[in-house]
Image (tube, grey):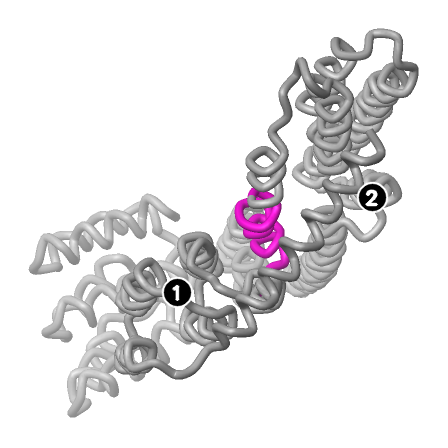
């Protein structure tokens, strides 16, 4: 047996020497075909076309690792580099230097994959081709070969495959303790790996639970509670990007909520100030000023009803005050003079201004007011005056009578809406 092993290692050394010598005698020189291939690859920007040029060359020609590296330099995709290297490997004359091609990949995982499908695969083929042993002649050699193969599979975490190989070895030597220990070792590693995976799954499940709870709390604007959940998730997986982004988002939302609350508080402060100011103006019988202030308050919070109630109350008090005073009148002679002064104005704006001044100072009946309206030719001017007169009349319930003084349906409708609103 020792003699056979000696012969076995001599064959390996001899094979290595022959390969090195073959490689040295076939060093790459820039052949015309390779130069043409490289020229073609350089002449196009299309990745697939470059790949096809390289495949056509390396599938048909013996080449060196350096030539293959040069071709890979013009391919940007690791996938294409991998496919080219696998296809070219059988025709590479200096396979001892093939490991240098791994530097051509941007991701190391592709280099590992290439190794498994070229050099490692060749090692198995060499072992299976050069050292096929007759079971009946040398069971020990087969046993050793199976153990080596099982060890290689185990080192690659191929547990089921390694276990199958060890069991084949155990069939050859049922009483061998070494192979039994290896089988037990595989089972032990599998159990440990399963425990690690289970622990990882539990950790991931707990992590996801914290994230989900945090999301629910955040959706309910419970920002501090949400951040606490995200931080618990971060404690499980320090530096995890998901938890980090959630915490960042929650803090951003917390700041926005704080700004919104501050803005809302400022609005309420302004609203309360205006409401108090309006009340003071009402108490001083400055009803028009109070109504204006209450309208400003209603513009801040349109859904709040109190400003509208206050406006109605100010109008009512204004009317009551007017009724409490002796009802003033304007004589026909004076009224005719007032109409003339309004009509004598050259422009509609001046007529409106003059009419408003008289309305503020004089007391007109509905009939007198109705005589002022025809002075204006435009419906918009008429409607403006009617609305203005409304605030200074003690007969507001009769303002529907002005409808017939308007020409257009749209203006009549606008008057209707104004009166309904009042």
Residue density around tag 2, few if under 14, some if 14–19, many if 20 or more, within 10 Å? some
Q: CA distance from mark 1 to mark 2?
A: 52 Å
User: Which quarter of the picture shows residue 106?
Assistant: bottom right
Residue extending furthest front? 3
Q: Which residue does the numbered mark 1 point to in the structure image?
A: 62
Task: Determine if residue 76 is in view.
Answer: yes
Label 1, secondary structure: give it.
Answer: loop
**Labelled disc at residue 118:** none
State the residue in front, 244 or 183: 183
In magenta segment, residue 218? no
Pair 1/2: label in front: 1
Label 2, secondary structure: give it.
Answer: loop
Q: Give the magenta-colored segment's residue range.
A: 106-121
Q: Give the residue at x 85% y 49%.
A: 238
State the residue in front, 211 or 218: 211
Q: Give the residue at x 62% y 44%.
A: 123
Residue extending furthest bottom? 346
- Residue 272 coordinates in the image, percent (x, y): 71, 57
Task: Determine if residue 290 is in view.
Answer: no
Residue 186 to residue 29: above or below: above
- Residue 266 coordinates in the image, percent (x, y): 71, 63
Q: Is residue 414 left or right of residue 200?
A: left
Q: Which residue does the numbered mark 2 point to in the structure image?
A: 237
Q: Is residue 74 left or right of residue 188?
A: left
- Residue 191 coordinates in the image, percent (x, y): 84, 19
User: Which quarter of the picture shows residue 40?
Assistant: bottom left
In magenta segment, residue 116? yes
């Amino acid at each position: 047996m020792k003699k056979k092993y000696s012969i076995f290692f001599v064959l390996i050394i001899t094979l290595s020497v022959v390969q090195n010598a073959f490689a040295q005698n076939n060093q790459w020189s820039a052949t015309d075909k390779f130069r043409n291939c490289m020229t073609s690859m350089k002449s196009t920007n299309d990745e697939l076309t470059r790949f096809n040029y390289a495949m056509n060359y390396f599938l048909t020609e013996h080449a060196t690792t350096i030539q293959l590296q040069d071709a890979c330099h013009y391919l940007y995709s690791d996938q294409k580099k991998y496919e080219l290297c696998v296809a070219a490997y059988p025709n590479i004359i200096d396979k001892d230097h093939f490991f240098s091609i791994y530097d051509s990949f941007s991701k190391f995982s592709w280099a590992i994959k290439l190794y498994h499908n070229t050099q490692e695969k060749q090692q198995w083929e060499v072992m299976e081709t050069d050292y096929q042993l007759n079971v009946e002649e040398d069971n020990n050699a087969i046993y050793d070969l199976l153990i080596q193969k099982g060890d290689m599979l185990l080192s690659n975490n191929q547990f089921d495959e390694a276990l199958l190989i060890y069991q084949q070895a155990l069939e050859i030597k049922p009483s061998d303790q070494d192979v039994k220990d290896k089988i037990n070792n595989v089972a032990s590693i599998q159990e440990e790996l399963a425990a690690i995976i289970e622990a990882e799954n539990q950790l991931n499940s707990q992590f996801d639970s914290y994230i989900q709870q945090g999301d629910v709390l955040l959706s309910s604007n419970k920002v501090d509670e949400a951040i606490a959940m995200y931080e618990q998730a971060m404690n499980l997986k320090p530096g995890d990007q998901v938890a980090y982004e959630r915490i960042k988002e929650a803090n951003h939302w917390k700041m926005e909520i704080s700004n919104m609350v501050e803005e809302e508080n400022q609005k309420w402060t302004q609203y309360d100030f205006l409401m108090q100011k309006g009340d003071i103006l009402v108490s001083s019988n400055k009803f028009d000023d109070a109504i204006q202030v209450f309208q400003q308050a209603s513009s801040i919070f349109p859904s709040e009803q109190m400003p509208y109630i206050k406006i109605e109350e100010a109008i009512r008090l204004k009317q009551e005050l007017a009724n409490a005073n002796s009802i003033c009148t304007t004589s026909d002679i004076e009224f005719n003079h007032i109409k003339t002064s309004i009509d004598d104005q050259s422009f509609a704006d001046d007529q409106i201004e003059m009419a408003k001044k008289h309305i503020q100072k004089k007391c007109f009946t509905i009939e007198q007011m109705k005589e002022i309206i025809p002075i204006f030719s435009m419906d918009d001017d008429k409607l403006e005056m009617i609305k203005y007169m409304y605030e200074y009349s003690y007969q507001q319930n009769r303002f529907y009578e002005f409808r017939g003084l308007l020409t257009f349906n749209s203006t009549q409708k606008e008057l209707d809406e104004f009166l309904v609103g009042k």
